[in-house]
Image (cartoon, rainbow, N blue to C red):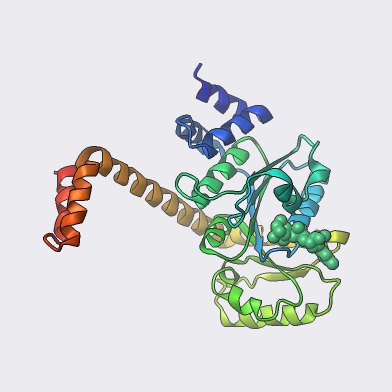
């Protein structure tokens, strides 16, 4: 049996070492990655994927830790992916601190993976998607994906979840306005964490104002206040997640979202493949350089140049 198929069998059987090896293959962009991902793909659709995003220090990791504890009490297995697009560090103390999952380190029902660096094959969002696929295929009931910040990567990563939690805190003030553009739109549930601080009502009111301006497909996102450090409000948060999930299933929102994700996955993969095919079959690196030089010199227009390459590939 090939190494890849051994890893696949192990992952599908819930073996933790096989899972770790599969994740490394995917993260390193090893040649085994694709056969592994292909083989587990049909078995990766059962987990509930929850995206947790928001500004740095909002308490996302503390919340993820509390949610994990509650899910474990209910007998559910949990995968956690902590994505930190801004951090130049990989692993080590800083990430350990960011994740705050020490309490679950020895629990075999919890698997934690951190992704700290950019430069993954196909981009960070794609790499995160692959990690989620492997965790789901290994039988995790719930996969929690934590992302820091409000950039394009984060919106993309969180947007690929079944349920998206946007975590805010009192005292953000103008930051809420800045968040509005990207992250607010993808929120299924708002969490106002650090509710032990002043100003909770104000944040809630600001979110309500923002929500009143938007269109939410007939389902206004719930706003749940929490004090993650004291495990307050986390039961209500879990209920809000479940309630959104059942609404999404009934209303067709979930099906539409899955279709949207499939479209993205397919289109991105197709683009990758076409780019590879162009490189391998239609245009050598030298030809490419020559073409670029001619376009730069305006001897050749880019439409004619690209059209010529496509004709070579698809006669
Ligand atoms: N007062 C208060 N502090 C909290 C609460 N939740 C988390 N904290 C604290 O806030 C700090 C940041 O918490 P994290 O859970 O690491 O926040 P995070 O959003 O994961 O942070 P990054 O991953 O670095 O963006 C820690 O010192 C927590 O103990 C809360 O509800 N109230
Ligand atoms: Mg964190």
Q: Where is residue 171 drawn, in percent x and y? A: 75, 77
- Residue at x 88% of width, y 60% of height: 230
Residue 234, image quadrant? bottom right
Image position of 298 (left or right of 215) = left
Q: Is residue 145 left or right of residue 240?
A: left
| Image quadrant in which you'd find residue 56 | bottom right
Instruction: State left or right for residue 274 relative to residue 7.
Output: left
Say which residue appears at 46% left-offset and 54% top-offset: 259
Residue extending furthest toward the right: 230
Q: How many marks?
A: 0
Comparing 221 with 88, the one in front is 88
Name above or below for residue 308 compared with residue 58.
above
235, 23: nearer the viewer: 23
Q: Would you identify the image quadrant in which residue 236 lies?
A: bottom right
**In percent of the image, x 63 and y 65: which residue is there?**
188
Query: Of 314 and 283, which appears nearest the observer?
Result: 283
x then y, percent, for residue 237? 76, 62
Depth order, front residue of 84/248: 84
């Amino acid at each position: 049996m090939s190494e890849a198929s051994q890893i696949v069998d192990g992952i599908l059987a819930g073996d933790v070492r096989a899972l770790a090896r599969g994740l490394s293959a995917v993260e390193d962009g090893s040649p085994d990655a694709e056969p592994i991902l292909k083989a587990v793909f049909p078995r990766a659709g059962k987990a509930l994927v929850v995206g947790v995003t928001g500004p740095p220090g909002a308490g996302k990791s503390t919340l993820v830790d509390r949610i994990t504890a509650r899910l474990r009490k209910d007998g559910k297995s949990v995968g956690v992916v902590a994505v930190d697009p801004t951090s130049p560090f990989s692993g080590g103390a800083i990430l350990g601190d960011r994740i705050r999952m020490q309490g679950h380190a020895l629990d075999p029902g919890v698997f934690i993976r951190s992704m700290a660096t950019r430069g993954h094959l196909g981009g960070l969002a794609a790499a995160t998607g692959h990690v989620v696929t492997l965790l789901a295929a290994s039988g995790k009931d719930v996969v929690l994906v934590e992302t820091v910040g409000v950039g394009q990567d984060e919106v993309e990563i969180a947007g690929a979840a079944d349920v998206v939690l946007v975590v805010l805190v009192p005292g953000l003030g103008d930051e809420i306005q800045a968040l509005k553009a990207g992250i607010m739109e993808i929120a299924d549930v708002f969490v106002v964490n650090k509710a032990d601080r002043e100003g909770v009502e104000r944040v809630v009111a600001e979110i309500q104002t923002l929500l009143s301006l938007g269109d939410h497909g007939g389902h206004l996102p719930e706003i749940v206040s929490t004090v993650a450090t004291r495990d307050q409000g986390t039961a209500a948060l879990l209920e809000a997640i479940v309630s959104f999930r059942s609404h999404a299933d009934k209303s067709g929102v979930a099906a539409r979202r899955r279709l949207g994700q499939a479209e993205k996955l397919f289109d991105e993969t197709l683009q990758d493949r076409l780019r590879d095919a162009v490189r391998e079959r239609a245009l050598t690196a030298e030809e490419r350089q020559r073409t670029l030089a001619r376009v730069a010199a305006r001897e050749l227009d880019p439409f004619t140049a690209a059209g010529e390459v496509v004709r070579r590939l698809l006669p």
